[in-house]
Image: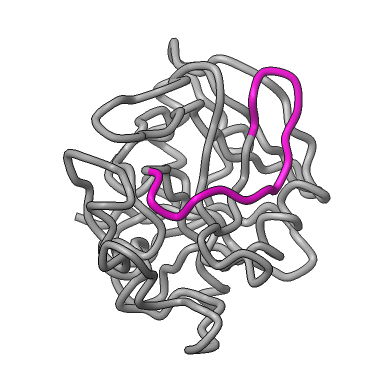
Amino acid sequence: MIFSVVTLAGMLAVSGISNAAFGQTGYLNGHGYVDLGLPSGTLWATCNIGSDTPEGYGDYFAWGETSAKEKYRWETYKYYDGSNLTKYTDSDYLVILTPSDDAATANWGVGWRMPTKEEMSELYNNCTHEKTTQNGVKGRLFTGPNGNSIFLPATGYRIYINLNDAGSSGNYWSSSLDTDDTERSWYLFFPKGYSVVTDFYRYLGMSVRAVCQSQN
């Protein structure tokens, strides 16, 4: 069921949470988004892929994969044949995930996608980011120029069968390949004291926070 913004505002008023603080703007395919007032007009989802609340960790994805799995390592990575990467390499010139390899598009439908490195940097550079706890979950509150905000839980990351650093760091994939080292892709990383857009190996399991464009 898709709620209207008016209905949501009423629900938030009853719960004691302000609409401005929550940042809800609208819905696409049944999933909420927030207009943070960013220069590009990019709209950020209120929840991680695999969750229906802002505090939920959601699913963990290797870069370019669209479903969660038990083990995260090179040997289980979709685009590794045991000795070489088979897609998103120097030879195929693919530097942004195609829709079929985009966890946001695959799980939430057309219109949703993973943010690019540039959009991650825009979020970082144009928002204040404050370490906070929301409903008992540690994470980071990103507040845009217009006062709206999104909460990104400190989800940690998955390597092999282990979940590491949950509650102490956030790790969110972008859709952008590191063209200087195609074994790695760009992601938003916030440990305890700071936030940064950096790169790491594609086989790790990280969270995804989707984006979309104006629905007007």
33 sits left or right of 101 in the view: right
- Please name the colour scheme applied to the rendered image: one colour
Total marks placed: 0
Q: Is residue 99 above or below residue 210?
A: below
Who's the residue at 55% across and 59% down the image? 185
Give the image location of residue 115, x and y in percent: 56, 63
Quarter holding the C terminus is: bottom right
Can you name the residue that lies furthest to the top here? Answer: 136
- Which residue occupies the foreground of this view, 44 or 16? 44
- Which residue occupies the foreground of this view, 189 or 39? 189
Give the image location of residue 160, x and y in percent: 28, 35
9 sits left or right of 74 in the view: right
Region of the chain picked out in magenta, as a range:
190-204
Q: Is residue 71 above or below residue 201?
A: above
- Which residue occupies the foreground of this view, 115 or 79? 79
Who's the residue at 34% across and 25% down the image? 163
Give the image location of residue 139, x and y in percent: 56, 24
Who's the residue at 74% across and 55% down the image? 121
Is residue 16 shown in magenta? no
Residue 143, image quadrant: top right
Who's the residue at 33% across and 51% down the image? 74
Q: Is residue 165 above or below residue 41?
A: above
Q: Is residue 196 above or below residue 5?
A: above
Residue 97, image quadrant: bottom left
